Amino acid sequence: MRKKYEGRLVFRVLVFTAVFALYFLRPESFRVLETGQFFQAFSPLHLLWAVWITDMVLKVFPIPGTLALGAKKHLKAYFVPAAVPAPEEKLRACIRADTRRALGVLFLWIALGVALGSLFKRRILGEKELFLAAVFFTFAILSAWWCGALSGTGF
């Protein structure tokens, strides 16, 4: 299982590196983002778009073996009850702590969205830079999740 996750992480690193290199080596590839004519001409970004669309479709209509176990945890078939139930007070404290952490992450993402939106509105960032930010943060989230899963934090 770990080899599978490592392979996915390597693939994501390669995708991020390729998009970042494309930004500097072939900036004209990003022209489809600026002109709003994404479906008018082919660009290497269409390959990235196809990967993202495929990933989203597979999450809605999973094929056995394509989803990580963490993406199936909400399904009844994958629920494994604890051998010894946790005391109710301890469970409530854990839920409160997790909720506080989740709210912290929510506010961080809202602040990031507001900051990027403000930079875009002031024309400090363009469409290409916003796209790079989206690719970077997708990569960062997946990497943080992967590292958390390996460390056993249940991230």
Image (cartoon, helix red, strand yellow):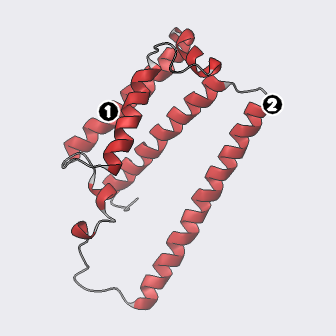
Q: Is residue 7 left or right of residue 47?
A: left
**Count of all numbered marks drawn on residues in the image:** 2
Label 2 amino acid? Arg
Q: Nearer the viewer, residue 140 or 128?
A: 128
Q: Label 1: state its secondary structure.
A: helix
Residue for point 26% across, 79% down:
82
Name the residue furthest front. Answer: 40
Give residue 10's mark: 1
Vertical side of 128 occupied by 151: above or below = below
Residue at the farthest bottom position: 88
Depth check, front residue: 1 or 150: 1
Q: Residues within 10 Å of mark 1 (few under 14, many from 20)?
A: few
Identify which residue is drawn at 76% across, 26% down. 124
Residue 147: x and y in percent read 37, 49
In the image, what residue occupies the spot 23% across and 73% down?
A: 80
The local crowd at label 2, few if under 14, some if 14 to 19, many if 20 or more residues have their Cα within 10 Å, is few
Report x, y in % for residue 89: 45, 90
Image coords of residue 63 (percent x, y) = 22, 47
Question: What residue sits 24% from the left and 45% below the top?
Answer: 66
Res. 70 image quadrant: bottom left
Between 120 and 95, the residue placed more toward the observer is 120
- The kind of residue tagged 1 is Val
**SS label for mark 2:** loop
Task: Measuring from the top left, give residue 22's x and y in whole percent.
Answer: 49, 15
Of the numbered discs in the image, which one, if any, rests on residue 122?
Answer: 2
Residue 4 lies in quadrant: top left
Q: CA distance from mark 1 to mark 2?
A: 36 Å
First reached walking from the N terminus: tag 1 or tag 2: 1
* Quadrant into which the C terminus falls: bottom left
